[in-house]
Image: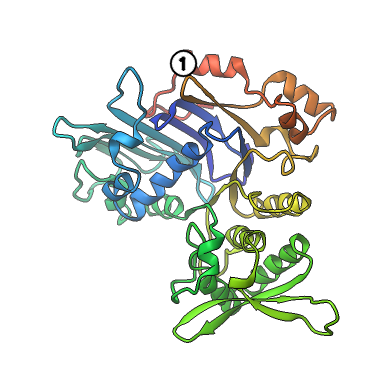
Amino acid sequence: MSDKAFIHRVVLRNYKSIGHCDVRLGALTYLVGVNGSGKSNFLDALHLVRDALNGSLDNALNERGGLSEVRRRSSGHPTHFGIRLEFRLPDGRCGHFAFQVGALKDRGYEVQTEKCVIDGIGRGPFYRIDRGALRDSSESSFPAITSDRLALVAASGLTAFRPVFDALTSMSFYNINPKLMRELQKPQEGRLLKSAGENIASVIGHLERVGREQLDIIEDYLQTVVPMVHGVERKQVGPMETLEFRQDMAGSKHPWRFLAQNMSDGTLRALGILVALFQGNRDYSTTLVGMEEPETALHPAASAALREALIRASRSTQVIVTSHSPDLLDDRGIPIEAFLAVVSEGGETRIAPLDEATREAMRRQLFSAGELLRLNQLAPDRKFLAVQERRQPDLFGDVEA
């Protein structure tokens, strides 16, 4: 586990296809598995935390089809789901935030238990909520809370818990959509790229003003991925805005300029990924970037540049990537600890580090992860999964070593 990681442990229970999960994360983590294995559900659990804190738990659940679609469906009919995130704040303090949401008889729901601890109980700020009632806290006064909302939203008004709220709401998640990037866009808030890239012109414009260094990095990588493209800038079109690319043309002394509507899906997607990774500037920075299959629509030759970009970005913000691309993983220099294997068995998602045979093959430089994936040999550690099955962790217990 890297010291650069913000979220260093994730425990999930009954979240969508994930019955139970307890994994460690580093500064850069690849979730690797075939389509439909449940990689996206792992990222979505973190995304739900961000959404519930930025807006409301009710909206976060409704955007996912309601509680019945979020909690895992099985013969046992679980009536709740739970999430625990163990973190390291920017100031170096460690802690955890956990909650469990359960169904009510009237088809509603409640936050059955919620707990936030920084530096350990007795050493730093903490609180525990049970069904909308404050059970215990380090603080002499605590704001009013209700059982249908996460208490951390109200507790963010207290100096003690504000750093946790700020860090968790600064996580960003992306599934870039070139179609939305290609369309004319209304001027929007440009401090943070939205999840599909639908405000990218505003973000590029913002970086032109306050993040020239970041924009230079983005343009350098973009030219590596798409050698003909020399740069990009925001372009005003009446009351709307779009992107304008500078691109080499045969026989022309100077680059030609093309609007986003004339650019390929691969070029637009590459730009969206790079902006998501390097958009941090003096106005805003992210604690974690979750990225869905960044290799989609990119030429395999671009994989090396994309890998390098992911590594560079992970030095300043935590990065989690879902992938099933052998080309992206075709590098024997990627640390073994950076991989989590994701499989679906009997409709349930299982997530674990790589098994010992796979790890040994990679340690001895016999195969890259990409080569093993092509051979269908990138397997999860069965012993790890068996231990998980026997000893499911307490969502609200003390932090394990």
Total numbered labels: 1
| Camera-side residue of 194 and 336 | 194
The residue to which callout 1 is attached is 391
Identify the coloring. Answer: rainbow
| Image quadrant occupied by the N terminus | top right
Tell me residue 78's x, y (percent): 31, 24
| Image quadrant occupied by the C terminus | top right
Tell me residue 342's x, y (percent): 57, 29
| Camera-side residue of 350 and 247 | 247
Q: Is residue 398 shown above or below 177? A: above
Q: Is residue 245 shown above or below 319? A: below
| Camera-side residue of 237 and 232 | 237
| Camera-side residue of 129 and 31 | 31
Left or right: 5 as drawn, with respect to 61: right
> Residue 223's quadrant in the figure?
bottom right
Write the residue at 65% across / 34% down.
Answer: 339
| Type of the residue with mark 1 | Arg
Tell me residue 14's x, y (percent): 38, 28
Query: Can I make out residue 340 in this image?
Result: yes
Q: Is residue 309 shown above or below 96? A: below
Write the residue at 73% across / 62% down.
Answer: 221
Write the residue at 77% across / 40% down.
Answer: 330
> Residue 105's quadrant in the figure?
top left
